[in-house]
Image (cartoon, helix red, strand yellow):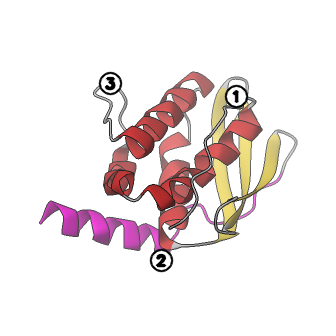
């Protein structure tokens, strides 16, 4: 039953994307990112005020997993510090790549993507927006590309 609820939550975010818009302004940074394994694309917009994410949004097209993950990420990161954003990013990667759920980082709706861990070919879909975030906030991390089966 929980798996069914998670699936519904993912589909809701994929169909009714939160923060699916462009933002502009003096403090807005943006990056365009293409998933190297499937062609999904996203442009991520992050408005930084000091060391905080004041606003965050995205435009893009892709599979349900990548679009839901981007929607969930933007909801999670509004108003958080860059340090918190980095912690969430690392927790998300551990959950998707290794199946580890952090007890000290609240991933909110993004926890519904836990099952993606078993779908190795979809790891980059779930992490695409988070990888784009790395580019914007300057925390480049080496990711291991995962080919789709």
Q: Nearer the viewer, residue 25 or 37?
A: 37
Residue sitting at the far bottom: 15
Q: Residue at x 68, y 23 (%)?
A: 51
Label 1 packing within 10 angstroms: few (<14), some (14-19), many (20+): few
**Occupied quadrant, residue 104:** top left
Q: Are marks 2 and 3 in contact (CB under 8 Å)?
A: no
Is residue 103 among what the camera can see?
Answer: yes
Q: Residue at x 44, y 43 (%)?
A: 97
Disc 1 marks which residue?
139
Between label 2 and label 1, give the one nearer the viewer: 1
Give SS at disc 1: loop
- 29 left or right, relative to 149: right
Q: In this rendering, is residue 30 above or below 17?
A: above
Tell me which numbered mark, 2 or 1, is placed earlier along the sequence: 2
Residue range of the region highlighted in magenta in the rendering: 1-24
Residue sitting at the far right: 26
Between label 3 and label 1, give the one nearer the viewer: 1
Give SS at disc 3: loop
Coordinates of residue 108 in the picture (x, y in percent): 35, 45
**Occupied quadrant, residue 70:** bottom right
Tell me which numbered mark, 2 or 3, is placed earlier along the sequence: 2
- 115 left or right, relative to 147: left
Q: Residue at x 61, y 42 (%)?
A: 144
Disc 3 marks which residue?
104
**Occupied quadrant, residue 102:** top left
Coordinates of residue 79 in the picture (x, y in percent): 56, 36
Disc 2 marks which residue?
15
């Amino acid at each position: 039953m929980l798996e069914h609820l998670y699936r519904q939550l993912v589909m809701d975010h994929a169909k009714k994307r939160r923060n699916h818009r462009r933002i502009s302004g003096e403090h807005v940074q943006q990056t365009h990112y293409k998933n190297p394994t499937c062609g999904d694309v996203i442009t991520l917009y992050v408005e930084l005020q000091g060391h905080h994410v004041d606003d965050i949004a995205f435009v893009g097209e892709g599979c349900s997993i990548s679009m839901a993950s981007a929607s969930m990420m933007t909801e999670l990161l509004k108003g958080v510090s860059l340090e918190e954003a980095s912690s969430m990013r690392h927790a998300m990667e551990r959950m998707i790549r290794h199946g580890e759920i952090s007890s000290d980082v609240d991933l909110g709706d993004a926890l519904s993507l836990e099952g993606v861990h078993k779908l190795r070919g979809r790891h980059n879909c779930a992490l695409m927006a988070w990888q784009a975030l790395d580019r914007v906030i300057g925390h480049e991390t080496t990711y291991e590309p995962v080919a789709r089966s």
